[in-house]
Image: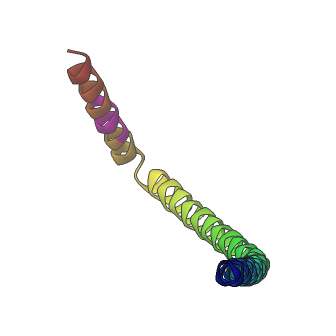
Amino acid sequence: MDDKSTWDAKTKDAARQATEAAGSMANDAMEQVKSTARTVGEQVRSMAADAAPAAQDLARRAREQASAAGDTLYQQSARAGDYIARNVEEYPLAALLVAGAIGYGLAYLIHARSS
């Protein structure tokens, strides 16, 4: 029976060592997961912090471009209005005929659509 007790003791010792090794490996794996999660969290936080100034800069540039486009459009429409006013003063009869033709064309299109 001595052999059996020795074998039982060795088996229990081996089982205890295996359990300790498995626990140690599980703890190491858990620490690796925590470390990886911490690193990923820091990277995401850093990326988010970098994205905010970039978005603000993009919005500022879009606002500046829209303002410039609005100014250009205003200037072009003012020039077109001056051009039309000059031509109407110089050629009032032609302007009246052109306006009548445009009105007739629009009325024709509206009537053709409703039919």
The picture places residue 64, in percent across and down from the top left corner, at 70, 74
The picture places residue 4, in percent across and down from the top left corner, at 65, 78
Could you tell me which residue is drawn at 32 percent across and 39 percent down?
Answer: 97
Determine which quarter of the picture holds residue 100.
top left
Is 67 above or below relative to 113?
A: below
The picture places residue 110, in percent across and down from the top left corner, at 29, 24
In the depicted view, which residue is nearer to us: 59 or 5? 5
Is 11 above or below relative to 71?
A: below
Determine which quarter of the picture holds residue 65.
bottom right
Q: Is residue 69 left or right of residue 105?
A: right
In the depicted view, which residue is nearer to us: 32 or 88? 32
Residue 112 visible somewhere in the drawing: yes
Of helix, strand and loop, which mostly describes the magenta segment?
helix
Q: Residue furthest front?
A: 1
Q: Which residues are magenta?
A: 99-104
Could you tell me which residue is drawn at 73 percent across and 83 percent down?
Answer: 13
Magenta-span inclusion, residue 85? no
Magenta-span inclusion, residue 103? yes
